[in-house]
Image (spheres, rainbow, N blue to C red):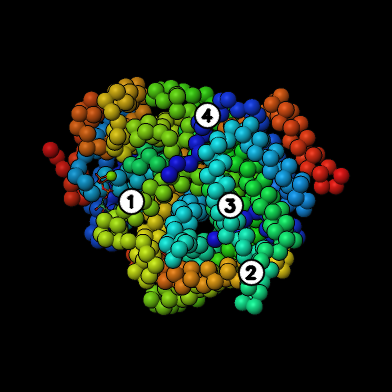
Amino acid sequence: MSWPTPTASRSGTLLKPDPRALILAVAAWTVLLVLTPAPRALAFGLAAALLLAKALGASWSLLARRCLALNGFLALLFPLMAVESFALSAWPWRLSPERTLLFAAVALRANGILLMAQGLVAAMDLATLGHALVHLRCPPKLAHLMLFSARYLTILQEEWTALYRAARLRGFRMKWGPHTWRTLGALVGGLVLRSLDRAEQILLAMKCRGYQGQFHVLRHFRFSRADIVFGLTWAAVTGMVLVLTYG
Amino acid sequence: MEPLFSLADIVFGYKSGQPVLNGVDLTLTPGERVALTGPNGSGKTTLLHLLVGLIRPQSGVVRAFGRERKTEADFRDVRLRAGLLFEDSDNQLFCATVAEDVAFGPFNLGWARERVADAVTAALKRLDIAHCRDRSPNELSHGEKRLAALATILAMEPAALLLDEPTNGLDDSHRETLVRTLRETECALLIASHDRTFLDKLACRNLHLESGRFKQR
Amino acid sequence: MHISDGILSPPILAGGAVLAAAGVAQGLRKIRDDDIPKTALLTAAFFVTSLVHIPAGPTSVHLLLNGLIGILLGWAAFPALLIGLLFQSLLFGHGGLSVLGVHTATVGIPAVAFGLAWRRWAAAMPPPKAAGLAGLGAGLCVALTALFTATILVFSGSHWLTTAKAFLAAHAVLMAGEAFLTFFAVAFLLRVRPTLLLGEAK
Ligand SMILES: Nc1ncnc2c1ncn2[C@@H]1O[C@H](COP(=O)(O)OP(=O)(O)OP(=O)(O)O)[C@@H](O)[C@H]1O
Ligand SMILES: [Mg+2]
């Protein structure tokens, strides 16, 4: 398993906005789509989000993988929502046209938000995201908690893999049943214990360097011409969504 | 010369079981280099942690930088003046980038931003890991992590370095860098290690810990 | 299992965001400076365990563990969950950005309520009983999360009624599993580190 990293190369991307601008844009985009009911505006939004995500450097394979997860979930929901009644007397069960249209809006909206968010992921790693959040006046404790847990994701993932592998070597197979839950309980307990022990050592290491509740961020960001390009693009797309909704 | 550290008749045991250290005396004078050896589990790490007050002895006296140290508050400035390199680098590198990690200590010393930036650059350069500056500790090799962890304490300009197995995971060329850097510093060195050849290149005095005491060899 | 973006109505999303913000703010207030590494590492640990999939018939379920999170983190569970859910939605596309607040609230409220209660009650119990209570509570936390989510779905439109029922059914299965899991995990932790869970009750 690999997590996005600070050095993820971003050469060959059209848009290189300041991370703060991108975070704000994604947040506003999410609100915009949530408040947009019209399917044609949502369809436009989806297409625009796809282009923006590409321009921000998202690869086709990344977008495909993320969309697959989401749309698998939506495919599961579709019959549940769009069939008016599952009563035996209503057999053969039929899709209701109004509900199908409603569902189309849901699917377009969900994909539109997801694609824009993946543009953000493609453009920055979790560390940059955390640093940008600090500069955006997110509560510092929250931002630093986020940075801190992002730092240890890989390590704890490895510790989990080691625990799990040890269980497998002793014949554990994941299948539904009390034995699985019991083993998983021990594994989760083991992971919690390791996390707490490590946290204790980390705190000691922090105290050794004079920790008294303060964190400082070295990285600063500066708005540049790229942000104007990005801002104008984003504003144009947003304007178009609004026109298609209310025009 | 006034010693940086002196321990007198230290007894320490973890909650369960018998004492790990049982009557240990030690002095470390400015600029001195001491090797701390002993079998696994003999208490080397424990001793280093005692010196900076991460654990407290059941009996005995810890003196550091001219004063007896007993409470958490006593030890706060000891930790800023004596840099401890932890056995596991991952626990010492907790920030998002190497540069930020190296800057953490200097910022807590209250240095100005420019001075911190200079100290970061200098420390990374001294250890030949300037190229790791903006990378996440996650992406470093084992040896690079070791050196980055050392950089985090070197940047604070300590008077003493307490190093717990510093050569773990280092290849020959990084080991040379480490030897060179440690030779250049004027810090007192207390090095817990199993690496004989490394210790021979640096240390002048050897303390061998066995069954809770220092043994002559 | 998470609800994706696009489903819930704006007032419900806003309500969830407000509740989550209040919980997170209180959580941040309760986290002392020295608790930051512990909170962060547990956040990462629970993110890792949430990726574990257990085969269940034709599909699979993944762990929620909000009972255990509440027990270990108390109020700090709110920020921990928010961060974990953010990572899930960014790194895997599970859940979604607009539902972050709702998810944090539906998962976090039972977690924190039960976690605080458990810490108080379990302090006076022998370990097996404390672990048993943890297991029961963990099952209850999953049930409450499912119930909240189903209710919210129905309030977002009557056309989500069948989905809400399916959601409840899926979680009934998970509920039993998590109750067992948490029982064993807490029993294990109380055995190897008796001070760990109960020492913090004070
Ligand atoms: N946190 C702890 N709780 C209980 N016992 C501990 C703890 N840490 C260390 N010990 C025990 O104390 C003894 C000394 O451990 P220490 O880590 O100081 O040894 P060491 O000389 O550094 O060994 P190594 O060469 O393996 O690093 C060991 O027997 C160990 O099991
Ligand atoms: Mg050791």
Tag 2 and tag 1, C-beta contact below 8 Å: no
Q: Which residue matches tag 4?
A: A9
Is tag 4's residue or tag 3's residue first in the polypeptide sequence?
4
Q: Nearer the viewer, mark 3 or mark 1?
A: 3
Q: State whether discs 4 and 3 lie on one chain.
A: yes
Chain that bears disc 2:
A
**Which of pointers 2 and 1 lies earlier in the amino acid sequence?**
2
Q: Residue at x 30, y 61 (%)?
A: A172
Instruction: Inspect the image, locate mark 2, and give the three-letter code of the amino acid beneath it.
Output: Trp
Using the image as rendered, state which of residue A28 and residue B117 is in the foreground.
A28
User: For numbered disc 3, what is the local secondary structure?
Assistant: helix
Q: Nearer the viewer, residue B73 or A96?
A: A96
Residue at the image position 72 percent from the left and 43 percent from the top: A45
C-alpha distance separating marks 2 and 1: 49 Å
Please, what secondary structure does the residue beneath circle 2 have? Answer: loop
Tags 3 and 1 on a common chain = yes
Protein chain holding label 3: A
Which residue in the protein does label 3 denote?
Answer: A71
Q: Which residue is mark 2?
A: A93
Residue in the picture at 76% in, 47% down: A40
Give the tally of numbered discs: 4
Q: Chain of mark 1?
A: A
Q: Nearer the viewer, residue A94 or B41?
A: A94
Mark 4: few/some/many CA within 10 Å (<14, 14-19, 20+)? few
- Mark 2 packing: few (<14 Cα in 10 Å), some, or many (20+)? some
Q: Which mark is residue A162?
A: 1
Tell me if I can see residue A68 in this picture.
yes
Please tell me in which quadrant of the rendered image residue B178 appears: top left
